[in-house]
């Protein structure tokens, strides 16, 4: 999983799983560009990495704006002289019932969880296809594999990420570019805590064969594996990291 000499962009790096991913890429020797719509979160993550002697830059990027994903890749190129790995852990959800939701909510869910991945990949490929190398890691959810009560449109968007990863991986393999994703199950992060009270979390955990939530660090390890050369023969995969919650292929 060593990433010495590589530049890793971590979008969504200002919190939760993304922060752990940024820290682990740095620990594995990569220079890290931390990007997030939340400027303060990105700055905090960058500071954690800097304090341990890592090479890091911070960037504000809203992935729902194609212009901003292009600008992000350009600014990383300017600051680090290259891009080798792009990982996105961006996501957002709220637990509500489909019948109670409106178009504005659906658009927000789809834009953050699916369109953001599409924009980011297109921006990354401007560099990766030209240099004939690169690795992309996106974040789906087990909700997109088996469905979750109260997360209908989120599940649809995350299932979209899985199909996108498979098809894009086929298209860009000829350019030496790999595309994969993780599919987390319940993971102890600010997003999960904001969405679910302890009663709901306890219920979720009962469905997990390992009988506990995952940690951000347990999600970060497979992201860094998939992004690194250790996974050089892996592409088009969405790996469930969910304590056995889903065992589908
Ligand atoms: N925590 C879980 O239980 C769980 C389960 C399944 C899937 N996931 C997925 O894992 C990923 C990480 O989630 P987390 O739990 O670490 O959440 P989190 O809220 O802690 O982190 C998500 C980050 O994405 C950023 N973000 C949101 N919208 C953005 C945008 N438009 N542009 C750029 N950045 C944006 C947020 O500012 C935040 O820093 C998400 O894709 C989430 O859907 C999480």
Image (spheres, rainbow, N blue to C red):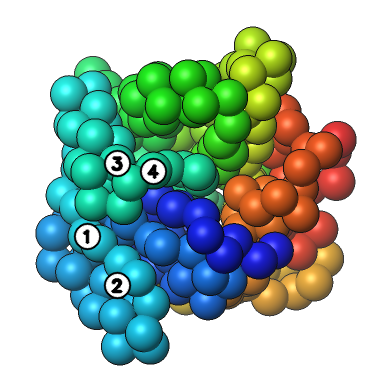
Question: Disc 2 designates what residue?
Answer: 45
Q: Which numbered circle lies on residue 112?
A: none
Decide: marks 1, 3 in contact (CB < 8 A)?
no
Query: Crowding at label 2, few (<14), some or many (≥20) Cα neighbours within 10 Å?
Result: many
Q: Secondary structure at mark 1?
A: strand
The answer to whether mark 2 and mark 1 are in CB contact below 8 A is yes
Question: What residue does disc 3 label?
Answer: 77
Image quarter (top left, top right, bottom left or bottom right) of the C terminus: top right
Find residue 165 and report its image quarter: top right
* For residue 54, above or below residue 42: below
For marks 1 and 4, the one nearer the N-term is 1
Give the Cα separation between the discs numbered 3 and 4: 5 Å
Question: Distance between the Cα atoms at labels 3 and 2?
Answer: 20 Å
Name the residue carrying label 1.
58
Q: Earlier in the sequence, mark 3 or mark 4?
A: 3
Is residue 176 in view?
Answer: yes
* Nearer to me, 111 or 89: 89
98 with respect to 34 (left or right) = right
On residue 82, which mark appears? Answer: 4
Rendered image quadrant of residue 196: bottom left
Q: Dot 3: few (<14), some (14–19), or many (≥20) neighbours within 10 Å?
A: some
Tag 3's secondary structure? helix
**Residue in the picture at 47% in, 71% down:** 26
């Amino acid at each position: 999983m060593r990433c010495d000499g590589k530049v890793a962009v971590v979008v969504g790096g200002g919190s939760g799983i993304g922060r752990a991913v940024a820290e682990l890429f740095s620990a594995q020797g990569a220079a890290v560009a931390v990007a997030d719509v939340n400027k303060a979160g990105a700055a905090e993550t960058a500071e954690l990495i800097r304090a341990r002697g890592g090479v890091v830059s911070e960037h504000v990027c809203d992935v729902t704006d194609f212009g901003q994903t292009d600008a992000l890749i350009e600014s990383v190129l300017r600051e680090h002289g290259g891009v080798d790995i792009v990982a996105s852990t961006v996501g957002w959800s709220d637990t509500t019932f489909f019948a109670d939701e409106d178009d504005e909510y659906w658009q927000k869910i789809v834009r953050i969880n699916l369109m953001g991945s599409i924009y980011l990949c297109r921006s990354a490929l401007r560099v990766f296809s030209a240099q004939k190398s690169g690795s992309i890691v996106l974040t789906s959810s087990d909700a997109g594999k088996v469905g979750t009560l109260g997360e209908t449109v989120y599940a649809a968007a995350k299932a979209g990420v899985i199909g996108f990863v498979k098809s894009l991986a086929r298209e860009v393999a000829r350019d030496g570019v790999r595309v994969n994703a993780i599919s987390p199950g319940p993971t102890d992060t600010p997003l999960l805590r904001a969405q679910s009270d302890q009663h709901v979390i306890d219920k979720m955990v009962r469905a997990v064969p390992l009988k506990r939530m995952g940690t951000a660090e347990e999600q970060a390890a497979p992201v860094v594996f998939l992004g690194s050369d250790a996974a050089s023969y892996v592409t088009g995969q969405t790996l469930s990291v969910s304590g056995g919650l889903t065992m589908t292929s």
